[in-house]
Amino acid sequence: MSVSRRDLLQVLGTGPRGKVSGAFLAARGLEAHLAEAQQSGRTGRALTPPGAAEIRISSNENPLGPGKVALDAILAQFGEAGRYPFNSTPGEGDLVATIAAKYDAKPENVVLGAGSQEILKNAVRAFTSPTRALVTALPTFENCTGTAKQLKHGLVEVKVDSSLHLDVEQMAAAAGKGGGLIFFNNPNNPTATVHGAKTVADFVERVRRTSPDTVILIDEAYHDYVTDPSYQTAVPLALETPNVFVSRTFSKAYGMAGMRIGYAIGRAETVKKLATLKMPYNVSVLGITAAIASLKDPKHIEDERARNTEVRAFTMKALEDLGCKPTDSQANFIFVDIHRTAKEFRDACAKSNVAVGRDFPPFEKTHARISIGTMEEMQKATEVFRNVLRSASTTTAGQKQ
């Protein structure tokens, strides 16, 4: 029995602009407490009251989900959903070829992942050991760190510098003392800061000179949100440099967090080691189709960058007006000094049905991560922030008296 677009949308539900429900595709709002729950072995649960109209700005998702071109492609592809991804049309090879063509590379330069998380975990498995450490930042995205700890491999965490950028000097120095893999998150999550192209190239050159066996993973999950003119993707650098590769994901600007599509790109001899660890059939037929369609729709990404930039500026100004200093965000989230613990802020916001990010040691006593939602969501959220932050300041001032 065939299923029409209208029938399918009635089953799935639609959101703003006639888009398929975010609960179906965007997987919004659970990452923060699920990550914590996985570390502790507990089951994740919602942070806000059951049944509440929640503003979920805790997981760095695109609040609008995939673009129309991607949604149309998904709906048209349901007839192939009974096929394995190697046997569908289009299939895995078509997505690999599309990514390779985008960067003037070859298919052997690309490895697909279930989101970029599979790529990151497999990089730790491939390039670190008990005697070859993972060198990473503190704080940064915890996936590589958690995997190294789980495997009992070496781990060196280098605290970010005074401006909350990755400390390139200290990370390079640590790599020269037995580093197997460097995780270089650019822009960095959670600090939202970015290093320009020259800094990245100089860092890679130094590591290659002093520790040529160390592999450098440059994670560009938030690449599409950067507005700093000094920044450029490191993909061309990775394609020409041994032991360097870049990871990307469709979970952020492309709005497909729930579809789990990511990739690594670099020289064939480097990414081949990742390919040997790749889970079979790790990407879905619908995800493949949506990713191909999205890569052929650059205007959607341009529009999403412009939307995010406008809402980000509004949110940063609202926080600055409250005396809370954010970093120079180059992503779809903000890392801000709230002058209290992240838990206090998170719990207070949750009472007003606003979910913000988890703790990020060693800044959990002063800073919070706030994802960028729609303009309407952030207008409502910043009103909650005003109430929470002002009431806490008033209480503290009263106690001092």
Image (spheres, grey):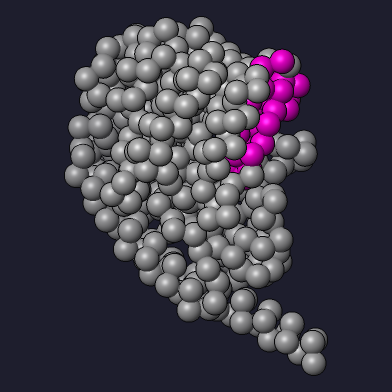
- Quarter of the image for residue 100 reads top left
**Residue located at (25% from left, 24% from top):** 103
- In this figure, what is the number of numbered marks? 0
In-front residue for pair 374/161: 161
The span picked out in magenta is 131-158
Q: Can I make out residue 321 in this image?
A: yes
**Residue located at (59% from left, 25% from top):** 175
Q: Quadrant of the C terminus?
A: bottom right
Q: Can I make out residue 146 in this image?
A: no
With respect to residue 316, does 359 lie above or below? above
Location of residue 74 in the rendering, given as x and y in whole percent from the top left corner: 30, 32
Q: Horizontally, is 384 left or right of 21 in the view? A: right
Q: Is residue 295 magenta?
A: no
With respect to residue 304, does 141 lie above or below? above
**Residue located at (61% from left, 76% from top):** 389
- Quarter of the image for residue 67 reads top left
Location of residue 243 in the rendering, given as x and y in whole percent from the top left corner: 46, 16
